[in-house]
């Protein structure tokens, strides 16, 4: 078998485990391909396991998999190459979504039809990033970066960045856990998640309970939200209708029905004050041949992404509506909304208002990691877009670096902080370190399409266009409200890849 060195370690793999992984891919809703591509993948994997990898050629695949006759014209008929490209993209999509934590990775590298079958090894964790930062940098509790306190340097070793802690450690998060040195404030965007209701028999109860639990685990990764579950959700609902608050209050509800081998899950997001439905969706699944856990995790991730991601159901209305009023000096959560509006349509005036709002926010709440992360982007754009520069270049970039590093120290599991640090490192001409940070951020929250799109754009910019394009396509498919910047990056790389 071939062994990929990047992110993987050469360890012996039992054929039984490989076949289990193959079955996991073939039965996943995120591997939606025609039967001929399923046959294609099964054939090349089984041939490799049988020790016949050297016999996997285009002619053999054309005849035994794609049904071509003995007169198949290998030179003038590109069918095998085209189908292999489709299969590679489908595999890439699967490992971005349902297979992101699978222990075995099956891939078909470009230039060959022989699959690589590899075991995942350790990747850097958020705590490793914090340890890599200069310990002499400014105290994280300082309200604002000093005007000349740009001495800190990010010291993530490029050659030795793949370290010994496993991805499971990075994902071992529980609701309410924090690495912050102080109790960090959160924006007043609150979401209560009611347990999904079982609308059928005993089997439905299993799925209702499992989806409810998995959904909380997925949503807690979005640091822009204050999350309530269980009994706290019930108390939250009572307060939402009896108290006046300028913050945003939402309820997430759902129901589960099971009929034979079919599962239907309905979900809806309501304004907690007036019970108006803001968003709803229906998810149908075939239960035959698929593990309960895989179905629960898949549906929960789709609901979490649709509701909580930047430009999703909660943040989209204000962030995309230029006429919506967001007063200067407003509460923390309005600064967050203003940031997403600015990211969607950056203008000089919106930059100034958003930067000033966030500066006031972190001055009042110095332990607010998300505020520092967002402020890093505003500082970076002082140089990158020449918006409202306070001092000559590279002052903005240096202040951005300080703010991003501060965000990561305050909360190493805050994806927005890692995303900001990735952006700053990339524009500081440190692409290798930036991409390693991107890998960590995506591992922490693969449902955050803002991270998925930005990481994909960085990969495409350094030449890994196929993978980058796949990520941007996935982000746009899952979040049509994604910013125009990523769509432009996608179009540019389509041109470079020769796609129409």
Image: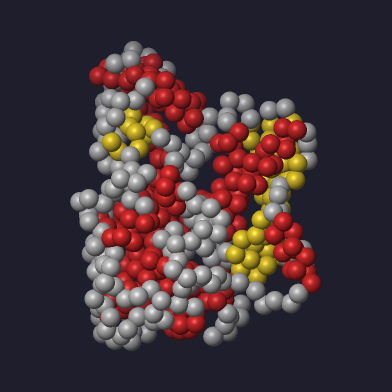
Q: Residue at x 60, y 57 (%)?
A: 307
Q: Nearer the viewer, residue 74 or 453?
A: 453
Q: Is residue 265 left or right of residue 90?
A: right
Q: Quadrant of the N terminus?
A: top left
The x, y position of residue 167, in whole percent, is 40, 45
Q: Nearer the viewer, residue 350 or 175?
A: 175
| Residue lying farthest to the left in this orientation | 159
Q: Residue at x 68, y 63 (%)?
A: 250
Task: Inspect this view and state whether residue 287 appears.
Answer: yes
Q: Is residue 104 above or below residue 167?
A: above
Q: Nearer the viewer, residue 200 or 55?
A: 200
The x, y position of residue 31, in whole percent, is 49, 35
Q: Is residue 461 left or right of residue 487?
A: left
Q: Residue at x 71, y 47 (%)?
A: 196
Q: Which of the 4 image quadrants contains residue 227? A: bottom right
| Residue lying farthest to the front in this orientation | 181
Q: Residue at x 46, y 82 (%)?
A: 363
């Amino acid at each position: 078998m071939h062994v990929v060195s990047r992110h993987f370690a050469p360890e012996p793999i039992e054929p039984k485990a490989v076949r289990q992984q193959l079955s996991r891919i073939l039965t996943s809703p995120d591997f939606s391909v025609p039967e001929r591509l399923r046959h294609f993948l099964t054939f090349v994997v089984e041939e490799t396991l049988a020790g016949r990898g050297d016999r996997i050629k285009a002619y053999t695949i054309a005849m035994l998999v794609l049904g071509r006759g003995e007169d198949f014209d290998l030179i003038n008929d590109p069918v095998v190459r085209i189908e292999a490209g489709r299969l590679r993209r489908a595999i890439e999509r699967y490992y971005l979504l349902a297979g992101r934590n699978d222990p075995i990775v099956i891939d078909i590298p470009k230039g060959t039809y022989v699959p690589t079958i590899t075991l995942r090894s350790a990747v850097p964790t958020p705590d490793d990033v914090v340890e890599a930062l200069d310990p002499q940098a400014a105290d994280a509790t300082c309200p604002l970066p000093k005007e000349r306190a740009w001495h800190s340097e990010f010291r993530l070793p490029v050659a030795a960045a793949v370290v010994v802690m496993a991805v499971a450690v990075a994902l071992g998060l529980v609701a309410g856990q924090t690495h912050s040195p102080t109790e960090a404030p959160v924006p007043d965007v609150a979401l209560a998640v009611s347990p999904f209701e079982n609308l059928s028999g005993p089997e439905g109860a299993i799925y209702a309970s499992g989806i409810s639990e998995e959904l909380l685990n997925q949503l807690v990764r979005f640091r822009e939200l204050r999350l309530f579950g269980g009994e706290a959700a019930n108390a939250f609902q009572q307060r939402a209708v009896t108290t006046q608050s300028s913050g945003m209050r939402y309820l997430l509800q759902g129901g589960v029905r099971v009929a034979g081998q079919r599962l239907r899950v309905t979900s809806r997001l309501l304004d907690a004050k007036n019970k108006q439905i803001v968003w709803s969706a229906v998810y149908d699944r075939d239960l035959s041949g698929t593990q309960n856990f895989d179905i629960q995790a898949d549906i929960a991730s789709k609901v979490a992404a649709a509701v909580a991601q930047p430009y999703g159901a909660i943040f989209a209305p204000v962030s995309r509506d230029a006429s919506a009023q967001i007063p200067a000096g407003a509460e923390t959560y309005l600064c967050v909304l203003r940031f997403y509006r600015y990211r969607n349509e950056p203008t000089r005036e919106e930059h100034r208002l958003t930067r000033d709002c966030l500066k006031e926010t972190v001055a009042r709440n110095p332990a607010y990691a998300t505020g520092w992360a967002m402020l890093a982007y505003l500082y970076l754009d002082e140089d990158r877009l020449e918006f409202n520069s306070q001092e000559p270049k590279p002052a903005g970039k240096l202040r951005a670096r300080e703010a991003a590093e501060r965000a990561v120290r305050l909360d190493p599991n805050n994806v927005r902080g890692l995303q900001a640090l990735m952006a700053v490192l990339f524009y500081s001409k440190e692409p290798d370190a930036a991409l390693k940070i991107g890998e960590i951020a995506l591992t922490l929250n693969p449902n955050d399409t803002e991270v998925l799109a930005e990481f994909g754009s960085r990969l495409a910019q350094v030449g890994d266009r196929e993978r980058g394009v796949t990520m941007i396509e996935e982000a746009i498919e899952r979040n049509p409200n994604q910013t125009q910047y990523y769509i432009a990056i996608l179009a540019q790389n389509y041109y470079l890849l020769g796609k129409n």
